[in-house]
Image: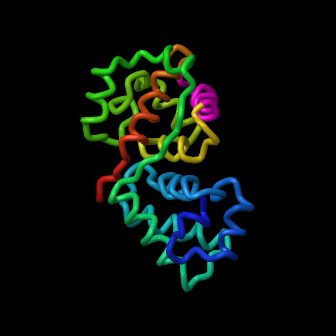
């Protein structure tokens, strides 16, 4: 909730502008907009500039843009949690055991989709980049953050090439990581 989260530099007028846009209508979607800017080879600071450009496009007053960027980047670097729920039917079709989930949560994400996620092959990662513009793990999390819910996210990733037999497994990993806390490494 943009109002309840009280993002520094985001006042009532900016909130109304953000709510009028799918890309920024919630705090999670705003954070997802930042993650969308972490393209291949992009640094944290480069992504911050892209995010600032997006704020400009959405009418955020110039005097508050740096404040908003700093607040969002600091939140991401510190780590944040999001509760995204999978329904029981979808969860039961995941190929992730408890041990698999624990191992996934313990590992450091590399940014490489095929290395980071069970259920995404190199070929699928390449297709997701070519067809959907999702070039890395951070952009993949942006897609999750900008989805309405886990079902919407799963439908989207199927459209981008994740096999139906693996989609619940991939969503399961994303849901678990967001619930445990996602932290972006500073580069």
Q: Residue at x 40, y 62 (%)?
A: 75
57 displayed left or right of 121: right
Query: The C terminus appears in which quarter of the rendering?
Result: bottom left
Q: Residue at x 44, y 70 (%)?
A: 71
Q: Nearer the viewer, residue 63 or 42?
A: 63
Instruction: Give the image location of residue 158, x and y in percent.
Output: 60, 25
Q: Residue at x 71, y 68 (%)?
A: 17
Q: Nearer the viewer, residue 157 or 179?
A: 179
Instruction: Give the image location of residue 36, x and y in percent.
Output: 51, 52
Vertical comparison of 10 with 132: above or below:
below
Instruction: Please name the predominant secondary structure of the magenta segment in the image.
Output: helix
Q: Residue at x 39, y 38 (%)?
A: 177
Segment tinted magenta in the rendering = 151-162
Q: Nearer the viewer, residue 84 or 144?
A: 84
128 within the magenta span:
no
Instruction: Give the image location of residue 147, x and y in percent.
Output: 61, 42
């Amino acid at each position: 909730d943009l109002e309840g989260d009280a993002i520094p530099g985001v006042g009532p007028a900016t909130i109304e502008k953000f709510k009028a846009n799918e890309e920024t209508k919630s705090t999670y979607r705003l954070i997802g907009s930042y993650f969308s800017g972490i393209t291949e080879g992009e640094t944290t600071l480069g992504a911050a500039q892209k995010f600032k450009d997006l704020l400009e496009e959405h009418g955020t007053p110039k005097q508050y843009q740096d404040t908003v960027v700093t607040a969002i980047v600091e939140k991401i670097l510190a780590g944040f949690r999001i509760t995204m729920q999978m329904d029981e039917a979808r969860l039961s079709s995941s190929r992730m055991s408890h041990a698999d989930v624990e191992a996934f949560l313990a590992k450091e994400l590399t940014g490489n989709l095929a290395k980071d996620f069970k259920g995404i092959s190199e070929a699928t990662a390449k297709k997701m980049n070519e067809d959907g513009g999702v070039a890395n793990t951070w952009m993949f999390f942006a897609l999750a953050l900008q989805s309405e819910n886990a079902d919407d996210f799963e439908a989207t990733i199927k459209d981008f090439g994740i096999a139906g037999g693996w989609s619940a497994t991939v969503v399961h990993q994303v849901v678990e990581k967001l619930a445990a806390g996602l932290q972006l490494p500073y580069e």
